[in-house]
Image (cartoon, coloured by chain):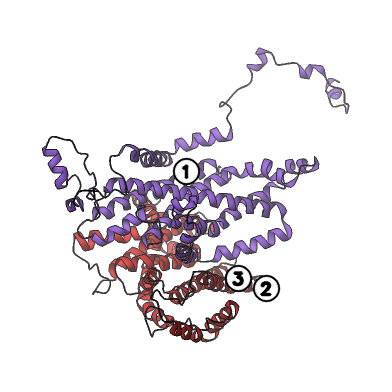
Chain colours: A purple, B red
Amino acid sequence: MKNEATKKMTMHIDVEDLIPATAEEKAYVVQMRPSTTFFKDGVRRLIKNKVAFVSFIVIVLITLAAIVLPIFWPYAYDDMLGNVPGQPMDASYNNLKPFTYSRTEQAMIDAGESVFPHVFGTDSAGRDYFIRVVYGTRISLAVGFFASIIVLIIGMTVGAVSGYCGGKVDLIIMRIVDIIYSLPDMLMVILLASVLKMTLGSVIEGTVLESIGSNIISLFIVFGILYWVSMARLIRGQILSLREQEYVLAARAAGAPGGWIIRKHLLPNCMSVVFISVALQIPSAIFTESYLSFIGLGVNAPMPSLGSLASDALNGITTYPYRMVIPAIVISLIVLSLNLFGDGLRDAFDPKLNT
Amino acid sequence: MNAKTISYIIKRIILAVITVWVVITVTFFVMHAVPGGPFMGEKAISEAAQKALEAKYGLDKPLGVQYVTYLKDIVTKFDFGPSLKQRGRTVVGIIGDGMKTSVKLGLIAAVIALACGVVLGSIAALRRNTILDRIVMVMTTAFVSMPSFIMGSLLLIIFAVKLHVLPANGAAAGGLILPIITLSLSPMAHITRLTRSSMLDVLGQDYIRTAKAKGVPYIRIIFGHALKNSLLPVITYFGPMLAYIVTGSLVVEQIFAVPGIGRAFISSITGRDYPMIMGTTIILAALIVVMNLISDILYKIVDPRITLE
């Protein structure tokens, strides 16, 4: 009889159902694992992944070194040590081997003063090579990071609008994406970079942008024009599946405007996918930057980047092979660890791959 | 081939044609945005000579007319105009000369990458989770992350500068060996990984188990059943591989001083030889687009299971 009473179709609420559980009842609940959020769960998986964790530490160490070391290093990246104003040029500063000293410095050491060693020697213009590598790393990392941010912003906006609006807007945007996607990216990058290099200098003269250098700006423009398409495709795919969810329907029924739904409901839900692809975008941007620097379209001299250092080293490769090896190792290390970390991030945070 | 396949192929061909047209258009207008225009040399020439030059190449006409002429010359006569720096030579002539070396370099690199990649990938898949598999995977990870110019420079240091076993100059006898190795390593790593994963996938299929159950010899299962099917995804990599080899050869030819199209392209950029930059960009881009088209269509034809949007 009691069973029948509970099944009755009625709005009557049984008060007993709402009484808080007693301590005795709570003890029955078996907790297999402490409750966790999606983010915490992902981080746990990430830390357990040894390769990704080590890569992460390598990235952090390299980034910290690139930021901190130039602050208290006694030499500057563009300091031609042999050229002191008011004194005759000391050519013995040029092309020093690692841990050797120029005549002036040797005299100072003999006089009892301490001279900071040139850990990687100096280059052909007498600049301390270690600080140039550190500064080059800084430039390469910064270019990779900001280029990825630009790609992220453009790709996210276009992808979200295309996915949410659907219909004709989506069709037109996706055809444009298709065409840009099938362009041979590297050739277009070279073409645009070589043209921007020639035209941009006079355009940005006298503005804040000039201090960054026309070549880096042109690099950012090129990235902004060409590389947003895969990000836009990714976001669009996500949005397309998300916008069919009930909560979006509920929000629309409650009268929420489109932009608000995109910002508050759709984009936060694609964040994990977005972060993964940004993490994988950074090494490819660094790759592209070093490639362009190597063929002479990268950063403006005397600013170094890892690619331009390698390119400069090519001239003296028979005598000073270490000048090529050092930036080569740093680039490979950065790209490799970022790639491995990105892979780990994907394994940890992409719910579709979790089985 | 059913109607769906044919309509897919037609769609892809149209997209490829549009892409090549976009490349030509972008290249043309971007190049003409440079102050002074493409036919402006650095050396100051007399006003009369300048006028004569402009009249000869139609530079006094409006930009739209020039664009149409440029497009028409390419489509009907395959003419990209004369080179600015190498007087008396056409862009097509220079590219044709460079191609002889570059095509040889690229083809050999592609064949080596394909052969080694398939063999290594299959071995890694068949000996899964052994030391051999691990070594192959670590090596390929390293090769994928290493930019081609780094790889080339390191090989140069090791084999030409330190060991003196191979020449550093690409024009010397045997000089193409190092550039070929440099260019083939990264595609080889990609193909190895691709083959390994698709081989693992195929080995888990029911028909492999059936073949084993009915007593087909191991060798026949591998070569007759597994390898054939696991090679299909490799076809999709042909397009990207060509793109990699083309962009890679730009720096590799620079490093090893190979007299190919890549070196001509780089020196045309540093020397501001505009018609040469335009011509090389368009031809190389068209090559990559066509290769992508072929590999996509081929993939669709050999594997009808693939559904395409």
From the viewer's perspective, is B245 left or right of A94?
right
Mark nearest the camera among 2 and 3 is 3
> On the picture, is A313 further left or further right than A40?
left
- Label 2 marks a residue whose chain is B
Task: Mark 1: give few (<14), some (14-19) or many (20+) Cα within 10 Å.
Answer: many
Q: Residue at x 51, y 65 (%)?
A: B236
Give above or below for A298 relative to B174.
above
Looking at the picture, which amino acid does disc 1 mark?
A: Gly
Q: Which residue is mark 3?
A: B15
For mark 2, does the 10 Å Cα neighbourhood hold few (<14), some (14 to 19), or many (20 or more) residues? few
Along the line of sight, the residue nearer the viewer: B173 or A136:
A136
Is the residue A118 above or below the residue A35 in the image?
Answer: below
Q: Residue at x 33, y 63 (%)?
A: B182
Mark 3 belongs to chain? B
Please say whether residue B22 is visible from this viewpoint.
yes
Check residue A302 in the rendering and tell me which mark sits there, or answer none.
none
User: Which residue is painted at 36% across and 60% down in the image?
Assistant: A294
Identify the element where label 1 is drawn. Answer: helix
Query: Which residue is tagged 1?
Result: A344
**In the figure, is residue A237 to the left or right of B166?**
right
Seen from the viewer's position, the closer of residues A32 and B264 is: B264
User: Judging from the image, what secondary structure is the residue with disc 3 in?
Assistant: helix
Query: Which residue sits furthest left?
Result: A110
In the rendered image, the vertical position of residue B226 relative to residue A326, given as above or below? below
Circles 1 and 2, Cβ within 8 Å, touching? The answer is no
Residue B305 visible from this viewpoint: no
x and y percentages locating residue A227 in the rendered image: 53, 57
Q: Amino acid at mark 2?
A: Ala
Q: Which residue is mark 2?
A: B3
Q: Residue furthest front?
A: A86
Q: Earlier in the sequence, mark 2 or mark 3?
A: 2
